Image: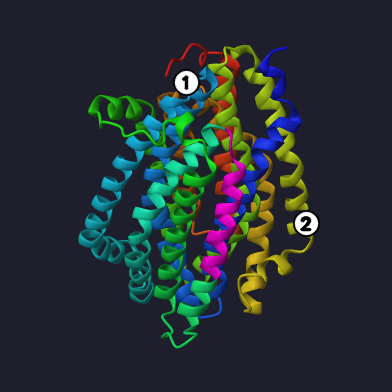
Amino acid sequence: MTKTLNYSYSHIWKVAWPILISLIMEQLLGMTDTAFLGRVGEVELAASAIAGVYCMAIFITGFGFGVGSQIIIARRNGEGNYAETGNIFWHGVYFLICLAVLVIFLSEMFSPWLLGFLIESPEISAAAMDYVRWRLVGLIFAFVTVMFRAFYIGTTQTATLTLNSIVMVLSNVVFNWILVFGKLGFPALGIAGAAIGSTLAELVSLIFFIVYTATKTDCTKYGLNKRIKFSWEKLRYILTVSIWTMIQNFFSVSTWFIFFMFVEHIGERALAISNLIRSASGFLWVFVAAFASTCSSLVSNLIGEGHTDSVPRLIRRVIKLAYIPVTILAVLFAIFPEHVLRIYTDMPELISDSVPSLFVLCFSYLFTCPALICFNAVSGTGNTRTAFVLELSALVIYIAFCSIVIAWIKADVAVCWLAEIAYGLSMLVICGLYLWSNRWKGARI
């Protein structure tokens, strides 16, 4: 009996569900900010949409390095070369700490000017900068956490992520309650309080990972307790895989930022609606992202075990499993749209205006779900440069749609959200054709 037989539906679910829970918890970070600020005012709600995506575009670059590292860790884990995973982990930690410090410095220099240039409303621009300044401080904690996440997903020890995320979200709720509204003697800081709360939650998350790893993980087996000698050659090797996931993730979220810039020029109401829809999308996205991340890790492990021919079957199984919760949730959202939107705001008119956009979002996930899983499968094969080119092709279609429908026609906000269907459908076709061609076979990392 080969190890391949372990990649059954139950095994896929066993790896995916802790990632799912952790992503739900992490998604609650942004949802918490939105829920609190939705009760402060429309300017703060709109500003948090732009500032949140702006910070995400910066964070996702480091996250992309973690994804590349995760692919390599998973391959070494599949090969049984466990000690090498620790070497990769520590090189990643050193690199990402330096990157975080550099990003914070550059942000303080250029973010005020950039946000002022891109955002039409002075009030939204000022509020967005209040959020960005405090939120980016947490990059130092968040980037190190990225490497812990890469290690545990790459070695398929995903249950750890659940515990960590629960701790982080509970911390964020408490910090937001105290700092946004000014409880327990603290001043009411509004949008800045939401950013500080999320940053403190990232610190709590990192402390948890450090303590858990030191006490519960076999550090000797994975070489985590071994003092390594930093090697530029080793870092360059990791970057040969990670650089493409870094660029790909940055472009992916940057185009999301461009979408919000286009919508902001339609009006504050359209931007506030889009922020609500973006937050509601998180409920669906976490399921897709969990299975997509699982697919990437298992594909890399599977190839490391020498079972390349079993990869297509694995991908099909992951897609089938992912469709079940995504479809159920999308139908529930479509049946009870106002109940979903009421989570984020208590403004009746804003809720009513947001319902059509929520319908469009729900339908888009019929394409987004298989598209992202196929894309992550391509990344899991080690062909990260090809994966970048494939997504870039889909993003060109996405930007073209946004330029015509939003910037030129200035369509209704619900029509603007059809961009998600354009992206998902194009990504599914492009990645599906590549996987079907078998040109991904033979990649070595």
Q: Residues within 10 Å of mark 2 (few under 14, many from 20)?
A: few
Task: Specify whether 413 is left or right of 46.
Answer: right
Give the answer, above or below, for where 140 lies relative to 169: above
x, y percent for residue 47: 43, 69
What numbered label is drawn on residue 416? Answer: none
Q: Secondary structure at mark 2?
A: helix
| Magenta stretch bounds | 156-173
Residue 273 seen in the current view: no
Depth check, mark 1 against mark 2: the one in front is 1
**Residue 427, position as x, y percentages in the image:** 55, 34
* Mark 2: amino acid: Leu
Q: Quadrant of the N terminus?
A: top right
Residue placed under numbered mark 2 in the picture: 332
Give the secondary structure at mark 1.
loop
| Residue 70 x %, y % | 47, 33
- Quarter of the view holding residue 167: bottom right
Q: Quadrant of residue 438?
A: top right
Q: Residues within 10 Å of mark 1 (few under 14, many from 20)?
A: some
Where is 191 relative to 383, above or below? below
Give the residue pinned by disc 1: 81
Q: How many marks?
A: 2
- Residue under the point 60% across and 35% down: 294
Residue in view at x 35 percent, y 67 percent: 134
Front in this rendered view, residue 409 or 117: 117
Which colouring convention does the figure follow? rainbow
Type of amino acid at the residue the image marks with label 1: Asn
Left or right? Give the position of 190 relative to 217: left
Prevailing SS of the magenta stretch:
helix
In this view, the residue in front, 138 or 362, is 138
Q: Residue furthest bottom?
A: 185
